């Protein structure tokens, strides 16, 4: 497996729409493996293909992994939200492409998602709580949307200012 480069804001690829994956073949599986390894390495809970520079509709999620638990990776190819709850929730989100920052974002509390798994089999899942939030965050990446695009202009500008300050400090 290979660790991939994670693109960060304001790289333009993060604002492009990803294309459907035609077939889940060996090449797609290798990319999913590489994405998972990259996500574990960067200590993220989700990663979408555009974040590693690949404009394909695929993502990996694993939010249960820690020192004691080996993790339960979920691979989603061509995910589609087919139902959303009326109820919405606000939760704090971060993103490997917006390093060091976090902000509250409103999402649907529950979503039903149809997707193809690691073997190309069609699956459906009813996601709730944190899993639902992560899915919506990662699926936004497939449409070129970052969580900071969902903030008010004021909050977004404050966050971006803070991020550029912190980047300056690192230089
Ligand atoms: Ni993200």
Image (tube, rainbow, N blue to C red):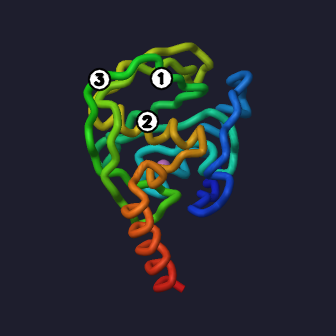
Measure the C-alpha gap from mark 2 to mark 3. 15 Å
Q: Secondary structure at mark 3?
A: loop
Q: Residue at x 51, y 40 (%)?
A: 140
Q: Nearer the viewer, mark 1 or mark 3?
A: 3
Where 171 sits versus 16, above or below?
A: below
Are the residues flagged by discs 2 and 3 in contact, CB closer than 8 Å? no
Mark 2 residue crowding within 10 angstroms, few (<14) / some (14–19) / many (20+):
some
Q: Nearer the viewer, mark 2 or mark 3?
A: 3
Where 126 sits versus 75, above or below?
A: above
Q: Secondary structure at mark 2?
A: helix
- Count every numbered label the image shows and give the total: 3
Are the residues flagged by discs 1 and 2 in contact, CB closer than 8 Å? yes
Residue 136: mark:
2
Sequence-first disc among 1 and 2? 1
Sequence-first disc among 2 and 3? 3
Under 8 Å from ligand 1: the CB of mark 1?
no
Q: Residue at x 67, y 46 (%)?
A: 16
The residue to which callout 3 is attached is 86
Q: Residue at x 49, y 83 (%)?
A: 170
Are the residues flagged by discs 1 and 3 in contact, CB closer than 8 Å? no
Residue 28, x across and y down, in percent: 69, 32
User: Which quadrant: the C terminus?
Assistant: bottom right
Measure the C-alpha gap from mark 1 to mark 2. 9 Å
Residue 123, x across and y down, in percent: 50, 15
Q: Nearer the viewer, residue 138 or 1?
A: 138
Residue 114, x across and y down, in percent: 50, 18
Mark 3 residue crowding within 10 angstroms, few (<14) / some (14–19) / many (20+):
few
Res 33 visible: no
The residue to which callout 1 is attached is 81
Question: In the visual, does 143 lie left or right of 60?
Answer: right
């Amino acid at each position: 497996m290979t660790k991939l480069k994670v693109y960060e804001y304001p790289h333009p690829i993060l604002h492009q729409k990803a294309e459907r994956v035609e077939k889940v073949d060996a090449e797609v599986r290798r990319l999913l493996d590489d994405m998972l390894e990259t996500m574990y390495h960067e200590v993220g809970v989700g990663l979408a293909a555009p974040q590693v520079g690949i404009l394909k509709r695929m993502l990996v999620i694993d939010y249960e992994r820690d020192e004691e638990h080996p993790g339960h990776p979920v691979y989603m190819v061509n995910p589609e939200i087919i139902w959303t709850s009326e109820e919405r929730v606000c939760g704090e989100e971060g993103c490997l492409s917006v390093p060091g920052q976090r902000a509250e974002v409103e999402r649907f509390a529950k979503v039903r998602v149809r997707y193809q798994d690691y073997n190309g089999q069609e699956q459906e899942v009813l996601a709730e709580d944190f899993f639902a939030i992560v899915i919506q965050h990662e699926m936004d990446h497939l449409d070129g949307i970052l969580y900071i695009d969902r903030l008010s202009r004021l909050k977004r500008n404050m966050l971006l200012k803070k991020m550029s300050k912190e980047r300056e400090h690192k230089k």
